[in-house]
Amino acid sequence: MNSNEIIMQQQSPDPQKPQILIGMGSCGLGAGAKNVLKSVEHELKRQRIDADIVHTACIGMCAYEVLVDVIFPGRTRVTYGNVKTTMVPQILEEHVGKGDVVKKLAMSQMFLDNKKVAPYEGLPFFDELEMNKNQKKYILRNCGYIDPDSIDEYIARGGYTALERVIKSMTPKAVIDEISKSGLRGRGGGGFPTGEKWASCAKYSAEEKFVVCNADEGDPGAFMDRGLLEGDPHAVLEGMIIAGYAINATSGYIYVRAEYPLAVKRLKHTIEEAKKYGFLGENILKSKYRLEMYVKEGAGAFVCGESTSLQNSIEGKRGMPRTRPPQSVEAGLWDKPTCLNNVETFANVPFIINRGADWYARIGTEKSKGTKIFSITGKIKNAGLIEVPMGTTIRQIVFDMGGGIPKRKKFKAVQIGGPSGGCVPESLQDLPIDYESLIGAGAMMGSGSFVVVDNTTCMVEMARFFMNFCANESCGKCPPCRIGTTLMLDILTRITMGQGEEKDLEVLEQMSDEMKVMSLCGLGQSAPNPVKSTIRHFRDEYIAHIRDKTCPTATCVALYKYEVTPEKCTKCQACIRNCPVKAISGSTTEVAFINKEKCIKCNLCYEKCNFMAIK
């Protein structure tokens, strides 16, 4: 059965009925999508409305979940954001039942299937919303538009046509050449040329070879892989099958974070559906090529995101890195040639095959081609997933797509790449985001986490937070990482408590350089990046903690000093009554006094004072 025959047989929603799309990704479910779904089902029956319900995944606008979209045949798609169950009856009665948009609740409308139709008066287009300015949704093109559990809907939007072309008209070498020509680089962090990796693996002959997808997304603030796996799992699988064909792999593994139960469930369903339709297993699309695919749930360790640790985990061993060489392309899983890429890298492959390497290479910069997905979080208005061309500036992401900083706070920096990345300050906000530019600024692309911080964030404490994460997640195999992260954490902790010395900065910088050179794997090599980048760009904050024993942002609790302003104190004794350690003295005739030696800095006196007498 070829893809054209499958499209003819698909059972898609009735095109003559209104469609109600409900975001059922993890972000939507966390915001209450299940209750909204139940309410929609109940109201459709109660109001006797004939409409189809489509379960979609995250469309990227996570800050506005639960998202509900209404599509009428021949009319544009209308989006309702932050939907509560109390809003459902009105939306269904007025919009689905009568065809009148509830404008006070509607966020936007979208072009459906790229067909321009007259907009509803007074509503902004989806592409005109601030979060979607300058986005180019190629890899995320299906997320939020299709039911991810429906292979038919994926096929209806061009799914598996790239695989069909590869199997029927391209040699493995031609596939590798096309990927190489496109300039696609690994989206897992290092940015290694994908075609070069595939070519290296293809040259080794073996009865058994493996293609592996790294979906062990562990960076704090990262959810790009989750968004793709929940929203468009077939695209990732199709890319893996094409990669398997290119290197002549016999088996594939998707190593997915166990904390992503919805992604795991959808991946297993996706594999079964692909087998039924002849895209996986024996004689793929009636060819001689065969490939088996398995889902392996992660062991819960951040280090398992490192390629060799991941392979040890698949083999049932403890997740610890291996010494290299040999590289995985020569001796990976069970000492067999193994090609490993991450989720986003594989999702790019069908698009490149369908559109062509030349077309893809025109997107991005000279050395960083294509688009990149980022999860933008932190002190930002529009938290969620975005996809932008390589070379987009930090300013564009923060202010055009992110909507700026809430509560009129000032943009201070962005942490790019999680624990492996670094902090880029506001002064470099016009820096284009590509592999080389970020490295030059002391950061790195990483997998795509983009954590925005404002002027209330202490950069010393932020460096300590990431070092604490790395120290806890170190597997302990090599001393530079095991001991280095612990010692650096101790120094950073002392600094945040006002016990640091100026020589500590020199020690931190020296240890950062040594760990980068001496650590066995990427975790230890990149763990010092947040420390080194914050010292480089925010040295004055470190100096304030060390010399003045103060935290400029009043974040570090150990450096708090509570004092009573005599002229404001009304002698009401509220602070005295609420102090849990009796550190405050005074009476109805005496101004309150705080004993700093007894004070545990619980902040209760500050909270309970109604006259702002405590500063």
Image: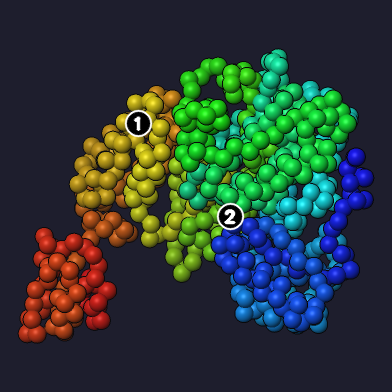
Q: Quadrant of residue 467?
A: top left
410 above or below 426? below
Corner quadrant of residue 328: top right
In this rendering, would 13 be left or right of 520?
Answer: right
x, y percentage for residue 191? 59, 33
Q: Mark 1 points at which residue?
A: 482
Viewer-proximal residue among 8 and 465: 8
**Is residue 611 left or right of 306 when viewed as pictured?**
left
Q: According to the image, label 2 marks what residue?
A: 397
Q: Is mark 1 on a helix, strand or loop?
A: helix
Please tell me which residue lies in front, 434 or 527. Answer: 527
- Which of labels 1 and 2 is toward the front? 1
Q: Which of 552 and 193 is in front in this view?
A: 193
Residue farthest to the top, as pictured: 205
Q: Is mark 2 on a helix, strand or loop?
A: helix
Q: Residue at x 71, y 59 (%)?
A: 56
**10 Å neighbourhood of mark 1: few (<14), some, or many (≥20)?**
some
Disc 2 marks a residue whose amino acid type is Ile
Return the x and y of residue 405 as percentages of the image width and height. Answer: 49, 63
Who is closer to the viewer here, 613 or 217?
Answer: 217
